[in-house]
């Protein structure tokens, strides 16, 4: 596969965002309309104690992705209630059309004491074309289980045939960081299936083999069907050193399969890498693939996990 980078298309610093958010546009996720494309992303504000809170916002582009039509100025979805899984933020927020509604899958997070964070996946539904979303309930639809004990998040949901498929991540263990200041997480990609998009059954296995070592972290899976084959893109990195070492930053990985059960990992075929300099020269992360007007596109973040916005790439010679 060969991708052509179209450059950074959105910088959060250049726009007024809801909730006094001034930085970060993480994990952009596309929703295609007849005349435009909406891209949801997670941005950040600081609370009274100086801690980050992650909110959902969106930007609407024309279909040439050169003109911004508008940026959300309102609350797309509120944060979770006190003590809930998404009390402190939503990152990412994956959207899917279902009949005349839009399902929004919440990767909610809340702060912990012994480790920095815990996550689960919830569901909200929009009945106003994705301008606002309301939860179906205060709790998650997918969370920790016997052998996936924590950090269930990063949902990507697609419907093939009469079955909803969710690719997500789950934590395997926490380890001490090299600097000894905090614990770092290790997480892998899993899969679950559903008939209604609400009740899910996990496969209970690691879907994508490790490339680096057993402590490789795999995040943000995204799947499309193209050319009769299923293609998965994701990002991966070592468990430690990724914040300060360019060579340990996120890179985008690739796997493919003829069905939705068996995947072959071939990162050498991913067709996209960091730039020599600029906003995406240290890392590539949080990919999201979508079809638009006969072409296949990839949204992605660059340096510092999307602090400076997101970019777009097009799959050369792609069609539906």
Image (cartoon, rainbow, N blue to C red):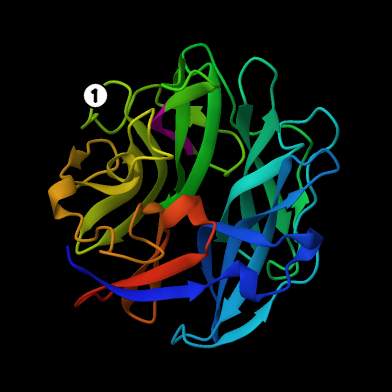
The percent position of residue 134, horizontal first and vertical second, equals 78, 52
Callout 1 crowding tier (Cα within 10 Å): few <14, some 14–19, many ≥20? few
The percent position of residue 176, horizontal first and vertical second, equals 46, 16
- For the C terminus, the image quarter is bottom left
Q: Is residue 178 above or below residue 279?
A: above
| Element assignment for label 1 | loop
Q: Is residue 265 above or below residue 232?
A: above
Tell me where residue 239 sits by quadrant: top left
Magenta stretch: give its range: 187-193
So how many labels did they put on this image? 1
Q: Nearer the viewer, residue 163 or 106?
A: 106
Q: Which residue is mark 1?
A: 213
Taking the view exactly as shown, the residue that stands out farthest to the top is: 146
The percent position of residue 235, horizontal first and vertical second, equals 35, 45
Lateral position of residue 247 relative to residue 159, left or right: left
The percent position of residue 87, horizontal first and vertical second, equals 77, 36
Q: Residue at x 70, y 18 (%)?
A: 113
Q: Residue at x 62, y 40 (%)?
A: 198
Lateral position of residue 85 relative to residue 212, left or right: right
Q: Nearer the viewer, residue 99 or 252?
A: 252
Residue 313 highlighted magenta (yes or no):
no
Q: Residue at x 46, y 83 (%)?
A: 65
Tell me where residue 265 sits by quadrant: top left
Q: Main secondary structure of the magenta part?
A: strand
Lateral position of residue 14 relative to residue 270, left or right: right
- For the N terminus, the image quarter is bottom left
């Amino acid at each position: 596969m060969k991708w052509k980078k179209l450059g950074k298309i959105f910088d959060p610093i250049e726009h007024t965002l809801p909730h006094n958010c001034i930085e970060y546009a993480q994990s952009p996720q596309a929703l295609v309309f007849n005349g435009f494309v909406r891209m949801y992303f997670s941005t950040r504000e600081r609370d009274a104690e100086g801690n980050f809170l992650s909110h959902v916002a969106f930007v609407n582009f024309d279909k040439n992705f050169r003109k911004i039509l508008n940026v959300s100025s309102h609350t797309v979805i509120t944060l979770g209630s006190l003590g809930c899984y998404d009390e402190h933020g939503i990152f990412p927020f994956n959207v899917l059309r279902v009949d005349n509604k839009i399902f929004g899958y919440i990767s909610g997070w809340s702060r912990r004491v012994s480790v920095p964070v815990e996550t689960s996946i919830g569901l909200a539904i929009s009945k106003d074309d994705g301008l606002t979303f309301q939860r179906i309930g205060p709790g998650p639809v997918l969370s920790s289980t016997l052998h996936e004990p924590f950090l269930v998040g990063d949902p990507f949901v697609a419907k093939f045939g009469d079955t909803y498929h969710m690719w997500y991540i789950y934590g395997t263990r926490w380890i001490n960081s090299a600097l000894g200041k905090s614990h770092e997480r290790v997480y892998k990609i899993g899969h679950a299936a559903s008939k209604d998009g609400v009740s899910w059954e996990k496969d209970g296995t690691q879907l994508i083999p490790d490339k680096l070592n057993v402590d490789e972290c795999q995040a943000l899976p995204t799947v499309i069907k193209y050319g009769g084959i299923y293609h998965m893109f994701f990002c991966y990195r070592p468990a430690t050193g990724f914040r300060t070492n360019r060579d340990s930053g996120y890179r985008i990985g690739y796997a493919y399969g003829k069905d939705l059960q068996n995947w072959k990992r071939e990162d050498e075929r991913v067709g996209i890498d960091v730039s020599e300099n600029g906003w995406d020269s240290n890392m590539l992360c949080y990919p999201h693939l979508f079809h638009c007007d006969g072409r296949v596109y990839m949204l992605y973040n660059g340096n510092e996990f999307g602090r400076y916005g997101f970019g777009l790439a097009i799959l050369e010679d792609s069609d539906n």
